[in-house]
Image (cartoon, helix red, strand yellow):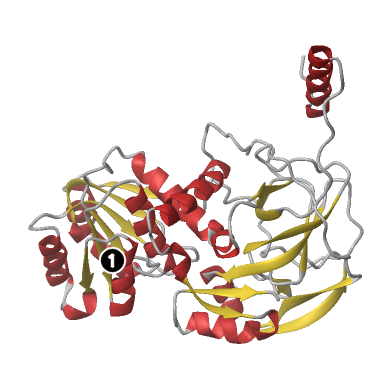
Amino acid sequence: MAINENEIAALVQQVIKEMTGSAPASAPAPKATGAVPATSKAAVLTELGKFEIKEYPIPELGDDDILVKVEGCGVCGTDAHEFKNDPFSLIPVVLGHEGTGEVVKVGKNVKVDSAGKPLGVGDKVVTCMIFNDNPDITMFDLNKQNVGGADVYGLIPDDDIHLNGWFADYMVIRGGSTVFNVSDLDLDSRILIEPCAVLIHAVERAKLTNILRFNSRVVVQGCGPIGLICIAILRTMGIENIVAVDGNEQRLAFAKRMGADNTVNFMEHKGVDALADAVKDAFGGYYADFAFQCTGSPIAHANIYKFIRSGGGLCELGFFINGGDATINPHFDLCAKEITLVGSWVYTLRDYATTFDFLKRAIAIGLPIKELITHRYGLEEINEALKTNLEQKGLKIAIINK
């Protein structure tokens, strides 16, 4: 006989009462918070290359809904693509999916987060996905199904709620969404949770090959935020023999701070054979056991096979939109070398929760993970923020609310 969550809670309370002779102590009072305004500002992408700040009424919450006062949100490459080209045909839309904030109001049914942790007013939260269309995706899905088919806040078509993305003063988290209480993490760490989860998933995918090991030689191609986070995750796992490949010396220098043992600047080498030799030299005369391709460049994907030893592995995770076709020779690049190739796309809920522990560990061992956020803008400056991202200035751009 199936028992729902309310019945389980009632049974637990009855057992406690029988053991102690009294009812369990009531939950602590909600944390104090300021009054909730009637309206909220939101940055709406109204046309290509242009956000407008609009004001919307804050709707009445349903019994399973949560109202969050937004504290900050990272600017993702997906936001930049939408700003420039609208590949998902969402305009008009409130973007922003790397966000976090403070709970200021909850529906009567909201008691715990998606991991079962108590949740109430005053707690700091992040969201993952909305799974109304796929109830089989759960927190502990043993099939490790990724969440690529679910909805995500910040990429939801505009509707009568409007406050559907983190580029706003307030956001409504609807019933059926995944939400996590991350009050034990600071603002910068919380902003980095979503992109870090992408890399946690990629590394978990790589581990399925049984090639990525403690003493593996690993090459990471691309030292934007995604590649740099990849290096940090590998380093927290104890992998030390990491070579970073990029064309920007500042990013390569930061890669060393994040845990890379050596670097290769592809701008200094003409042709893929010379570049592959440079990677081999960086590993002391060996090709890589495993490679992570983090650039989103078809040329980079075609080149990376040359960096990998026979019997090695590759995880491709750089393509978050259609970036074009990559040309490889399947015989020489894949078959003859017996390369094990895995793709990686977003994350599972379990990966998302694992990310919280990764961030704590990275900070504890001294990795400068929070220094990934190099530029901060207010909501009113969002057009400038997106242009800064497109110009590839700095690393992670963030919108911080006052």
Q: Nearer the viewer, residue 146 or 220?
A: 220
Q: Is residue 368 visible?
A: yes
Position of residue 209 measured from the top left corner of the image (x, y, whole percent): 31, 40
Q: Give percent across and percent down for residue 200.
A: 45, 49
Q: Residue at x 37, y 67 (%)?
A: 295
Q: Nearer the viewer, residue 129 or 20?
A: 20
Task: Quarter of the image for the C terminus: give it.
Answer: bottom right
Count neighbours of disc 1 (C-alpha within 10 A) and say few if under 14, some if 14 to 19, many if 20 or more: some
Q: Quadrant of the N terminus?
A: top right
Is 218 in front, or is 87?
218
> What residue type is disc 1 on?
Lys
**Can residue 48 be seen here?**
no
Seen from the viewer's position, the closer of residues 280 and 271 is: 280
* Residue at (73% x, 77% y) in the render: 44
**SS category of the residue bearing label 1:** helix
Residue at 85%, 65% (x, y): give it: 34
Quadrant in the rendering for residue 76: bottom right
Q: Is residue 198 above or below residue 47?
A: above
Judge left or right: residue 302 versus residue 127: left
Q: Name which quarter of the figure residue 227 lies in.
A: bottom left
Say which quarter of the image contains residue 140.
Answer: top right
Residue 260 location (% of width, % of height) = 27, 61
Q: Which residue is mark 1?
A: 256
